[in-house]
Amino acid sequence: MNKPCHKIVFRAFPNRKPRLLVIGTSPIIDSYLFVPMGSNGLASLSDHKTMCMHTDYVRDIITINDGPSRFIVSASLDKSVMFWDLDSMDFKFKRTGR
């Protein structure tokens, strides 16, 4: 990660590899696989995926992992909320405001 970050969200779920979700001052969300490198506290980041459907600054991201509902939800200044598949990081659907 070589850019300033506004928010970093670390998510680890049972039976799944943990991921870092990163937002900065742009419409892009970066997702990285978090791989611990032993007992020294170091980790590496791999499997970088860019989630880019917003047209303005992403303000916040949350994760929903409730049974069949498994999403990353992003909210932006473009007055939209995007839903992304938690497993594949693929875009699923969009909701817009006024």
Image: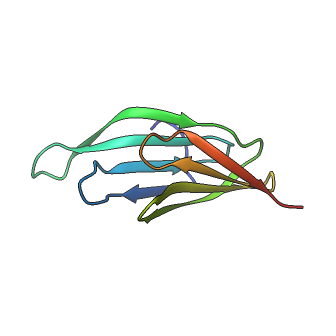
Q: Nearer the viewer, residue 26 or 11?
A: 11
Residue ID at (32%, 58%): 12
Which residue reaches farthest left?
39
Residue ID at (67%, 47%): 93
Left or right: 41, with 48 as reference point: left
Residue ID at (72%, 43%): 54
Question: Residue 30 at x, y = what percent?
Answer: 51, 41
- Give the quadrant of residue 91: top right
Left or right: 64, with 78 as reference point: left
Which residue reaches farthest bottom?
66
Q: How many marks?
A: 0
- The structure's colour scheme is rainbow
Question: Residue 46 at x, y = what percent?
Answer: 33, 34
The quadrant of the picture occupied by the N terminus is top left
Tell me if residue 7 can be seen: no
Residue ID at (77%, 45%): 56
The quadrant of the picture occupied by the C terminus is bottom right
Tell me if residue 11 can be seen: yes
Q: Nearer the viewer, residue 26 or 31?
A: 31
